[in-house]
Image: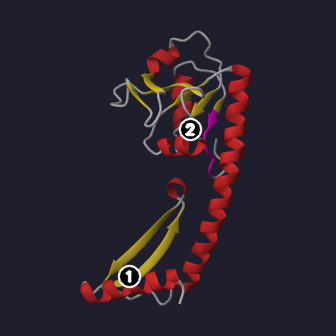
Amino acid sequence: MSIPEHTHNAHLSLLQTRWEKKLMDVQYVSRYGGNIRVFIGNGRQLESSQERENSFLNQFSEMATNISEWKKETKTWIEDYVATKGKIRAKAFPGRAAIMIKLLELNESHISAVYEIKGSIKINHYVPGTRIPILPEIKLYSLEDQDKPILNLAWHLPSEVRKNLAKNGYTGKVHDIKVFNGEG
């Protein structure tokens, strides 16, 4: 018996004996790049999740490869940009962006500042683990060169970020730190 099978069976056993619940369904949804949704209850138990589990393990391996490729391509693009044009500006800082910044090993030598919307409690702080300042977006819109490229750290909200930038007269090309489902 493999470790995933053992773990799966152990959790099913716990559900069935301790809480008298059954695993009714498992869904792999694509929201925000992928989540696992588990349905537990008193209804009809899921027949077998072995096929789904095997598929998940294959997808997990594929994800590791995709992350490695993304890191290499994105880091190369950012380092080339910085080497030729200087630090890049960044827009929006959802907390999950700290993971991307850490994976890419970005710091204040790559990103000049991250600009956040008015009222954000992140303003006047730093991106965790760096000295990249988080500034109010009004400072971005007061800069003379509104046509410089900008890195969108809220990759899961590409159209919202672009609309906000355009509404405020920013004309620079927006590069999403990660593109999902052909957006960006």
Residue marked by disc 1:
11
Residue 155 seen anywhere in this rendered image of the structure: no
Q: Looking at the image, which is closer to me, 158 or 163?
A: 158
Q: Amino acid at mark 2?
A: Ser
Label 2: element kind = helix
Residue shown at 51% from the left, 16% from the top: 141
Residue 178 seen anywhere in this rendered image of the structure: yes
- Magenta stretch containing residue 157, yes or no? no
Q: Which residues are magenta?
A: 175-180
Disc assigned to residue 159: 2
Colour mode?
secondary structure
Residue shown at 57% from the left, 46% from the top: 103
Q: Residues within 10 Å of mark 1 (few under 14, many from 20)?
A: few
Residue 66: x %, y % from top left: 67, 57
Number of disc labels? 2
Residue 13: x %, y % from top left: 35, 88
Q: Is residue 24 above or below residue 35?
A: below
Disc assigned to residue 88: none
Which of discs 1 and 2 lies nearer the camera? The answer is 1
